[in-house]
Image (cartoon, rainbow, N blue to C red):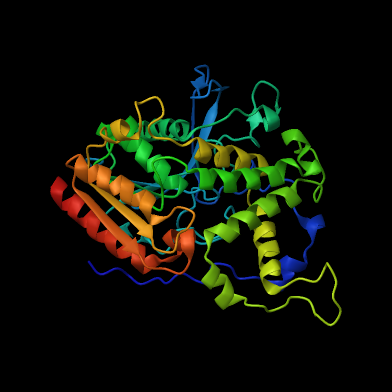
Amino acid sequence: MAIVPNPAPDPDPVTVAELSAGSAALPVTGAWQPGDPAGNRQFFDYAGNRPFALEGGGVLHNVTVAYETWGELNATASNAVLVCHALTGDSHAAGRMGRGHATSGWWDGLIGPGRALDTNRFFVVCVNVLGGCQGSTGPASIDPATGRPYGSSFPVVSIRDMVRAQRRLSNHLGIDRWLSVVGGSMGGMQALEWAVMFPERSQSLVLLATAASASAFQIAWSAVGRRAIVVDPRWNNGDYYDALPGEGPHEGLGTARAIAQIHYRSGPVYEERFGREVADKLDEFSMGQRFAVESYLDYQGQKLVRRFDANSYLVLNKAMDLHDVGRGRGGIGRALRRVSVPVLTMSVDSDWLYPPDQQVVLHEAFEANGLRAEYETVSSPHGHDGFLLEIEGVGGPLADFLNSIEKDTH
């Protein structure tokens, strides 16, 4: 199959206007709220009087999940592909930015007619995860018990909770079995849990730049990012939604994003792009003088603040740390034996946050269990973000794998 080329644009176009806007223009939260333009979102409400019990003991009522779809579901509901997003992603995996969507689709180059996730053939679904902030129930949502945003009262959510919420949507859409569940990073954690929790609900699995459980190294980076948010006095213990614009925890969330942006990429990329270029003149030394790379990190922080919520960042980031497919199942090896479908596992060779050896462990376990297991390494200088940016490197193996799965079902 020939994939329609759609090279990824410059992923981080720094605009002078955005960098000079200043903190006064930054919203208290970038969460989507009822009354905002819906864009391409659709919404599914459930629970009602039946509480949605969470793995950690919390309970939610009147749960909403936001989702988007591309293509058409066939008569037998056998062509559906679930795409699971990463930490700061959302349901807008494909499509332009515009009313309701602060950015273009995070995997736009892979979803569409003639692309790896060919919407002429596949019905593609992406769901904003439970605990998120772009239409699904999360900390910025209204607690029906109080009429105010959940804020600090929002419970801990796990990857398994996210998947159970997605299963409710799957039932609502009439999809008994996904042709494939696909995800990278936190999305890969969800995809893996789909295959372990509900083995009969998917026909294949695609795991990119992910792991069977969070490592100490990953947890360390996450902890520092979360600390940046909670030490921001404007975070106000999670109850900041009544603050005025510019008075939210933008410094903490922006710093958390800057920290993450460093380990999402690689040293050579930073060196090639920025080197020792300066953003401010070096005529006089001062502590406030910035190099170009510092200006870039400032921009990344402000960009996230405009479309995300600090509390959601904490909740989802913690869910990633809690990820352990072997928890309560007798260990990782025993849990992975529940997977019973073909699996494509992919690594990015320069990824030092989720290094290839983590994916090799998964691949070798699937092989040892007698599954059809394929493994691909994507060559990229972009580090962990390579699974988002390397459209051709990811798209080729993904398209070939899905083609073979589709043929096997006919």
The residue furthest bottom is: 283
Residue 399 vs 181, above or below: the answer is: below
Left or right relative to 94: residue 81: left
**The one of 104 and 98 positioned closer to us in this rendering:** 104
Residue 282: give x, y in percent of width and height. 80, 80
Residue 27 vs 153, above or below: the answer is: below
Residue 41: give x, y in percent of width and height. 50, 46
Left or right relative to 163: residue 395: left
Q: Residue at x 50, y 50 (%)?
A: 40
Q: Is residue 95 visible?
A: no
Marker count (numbered): 0
**The one of 278 and 124 positioned closer to us in this rendering:** 278
Residue 403: give x, y in percent of width and height. 21, 56
Quadrant for residue 194, please give it.
Answer: top left
Q: Residue at x 22, y 66 (%)?
A: 1
Left or right relative to 160: residue 245: right
Q: Residue at x 75, y 54 (%)?
A: 26
Residue 64 vs 310, above or below: the answer is: above
Q: Residue at x 31, y 37 (%)?
A: 195
Residue 356 vs 229, above or below: the answer is: below
Residue 196: give x, y in percent of width and height. 32, 33
Q: Is residue 289 visible?
A: yes
**The one of 68 and 186 positioned closer to us in this rendering:** 186
